[in-house]
Image (cartoon, rainbow, N blue to C red):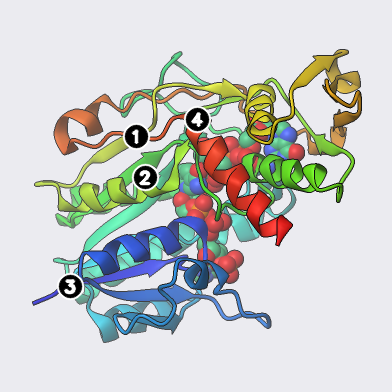
Amino acid sequence: MNKTALITGITGQDGAYLAMFLLEKKYRVIGCYRRSSTVNFWRLIELEIFEESNLVLVDLDITDPMNVCSVVRKYRPNEIYNLAAQSFVASSFENPVITTNINSLGPLYFLEAIKLIDKNIRFYQASTSEMYGKIQNPSQDENTPFYPRSPYAASKLYAHWITINYRESYGIFAACGILFNHESPLRGEEFVTKKITLAVAKIKYGLQKTLYLGNLNARRDWGYAKDYVKGMWQILQAEKPDNYVLATGKNETIRNFAVLAFRTADMEIKFEGDKENEIGIDIKTGNSVIRIDKKHYRPAEVDTLLGNPKKANNELSWKATTSLEKLAEIMVEYDLKSIGT
Ligand code: NAP
Ligand code: G4F
């Protein structure tokens, strides 16, 4: 019989790609979304899976424990992927309580539901490299100590440890993927890569003059979301539940990602000036296309992240397959096409 997977956060970047991946594997997918006044299924439509008969869309706000329990009881999935979150780090400084309610208590409600309803249900928790925060080792793996630097990271750290605790206390197959940044054309527009690639397309078509960014020196280990959702599935197919880092093992600055993205659209950028006076200049036109706006600085920054995916490579045969240059190209080409039509 085909397996059933329940995905929370189906309207988000990863939820949409994971649903597509699992539907291709012939799963029945219970896609959970929270009701809003505006319909929010554009990613599912974009991936052409919205009309799939094996995709069942279910109204579920993960901050409601009764709602969580009744959905788990009704659909009795084989696997649950908890991807729902308030996932924007900057917002978590403004909304720490709602961030914690969603990111920390949401997974706890699922773990309790599994404990009470069916301990055979496998559970995936979307842990994050943000938990390493002020890094305690130049490259981070499953044994690197955590040092969260935002309410978001702290909320995810609770979820990470409570998942491990339910695994150890009740023998539940509860696993954590510690994923480093992963991006795609379907990335939310507030995240820096998508903000950059969208601006590149708008500047190219004369619809925007300047892109305002925050800290250009931050470094991230960026991969392609499509590679990472496969890793989530592999983590739940392992023999035993565990924690796995998924990352590329390379990192780059925000500044250099911007250079790569503009280059894809035939614009060479040079940087001049320092700190908040730094500007990115389009060499051909002389226009200042990048400027700093201090409002994008965070109260506490995660300066650099660099993942070591060795364990996932060795035990799951998982590997990130998309270079940053290719990722920038995929994203810019998508945005050029969507802005140009
Ligand atoms: P995303 O695009 O921001 O999607 C988040 C999803 O969570 C959206 O579908 C959102 O629904 C849903 N959600 C938020 N609050 C909810 C609630 N109370 N009840 C039900 N659903 C709720 O995030 P993503 O990039 O796909 O990331 C997926 C997960 O991986 C998140 O948990 C994130 O923290 C984690 N993660 C992401 C990365 C990354 O680089 N992308 C790295 C490590 C970990 P709406 O559409 O209604 O807002
Ligand atoms: O793209 P970001 O907002 O992603 P961030 O904070 O790394 O978080 C993302 O990845 C995490 C995994 O490590 C996930 F857990 C989390 O859910 C999310 O998906 O910012 C990346 C960096 C930061 O250092 C930020 O300060 O870019 C810097 N940055 C510079 N200018 C900017 C901007 N970030 C944003 N969003 N907007 C800017 O204008």
Chain-order first, disc 4 or disc 3: 3
Q: Which residue is mark 4?
A: 324
Distance (Cα) linking label 1 and label 2: 7 Å
Residue with the mark numbered 3? 118
Q: Position of residue 270 (x, y in %)?
A: 78, 17
Marks 2/3 in contact by CB < 8 Å: the verdict is no
Q: Earlier in the sequence, mark 2 or mark 4?
A: 2
Q: Give the residue at mark 1.
A: 320
Q: Alpha-carbon distance for marks 2 and 4?
A: 14 Å
Q: Quadrant of residue 311?
A: top left
272 to the left or right of 303: right
Residue depicted at x 60% and y 56%: 99
In x, y percent, where is residue 33?
49, 75
First-in-chain label (2 vs 3): 3
Q: Is residue 50 above or below residue 253?
A: below
The kind of residue tagged 2 is: Tyr
- Identify which residue is drawn at 70% across, 47% down: 198
Give the residue number, with chain letter if any, for mark 2: 228
Circle 1: residue type: Ala
Question: x, y percentage for residue 220?
Answer: 55, 28
Which quarter of the figure is the C terminus placed in?
Answer: bottom right
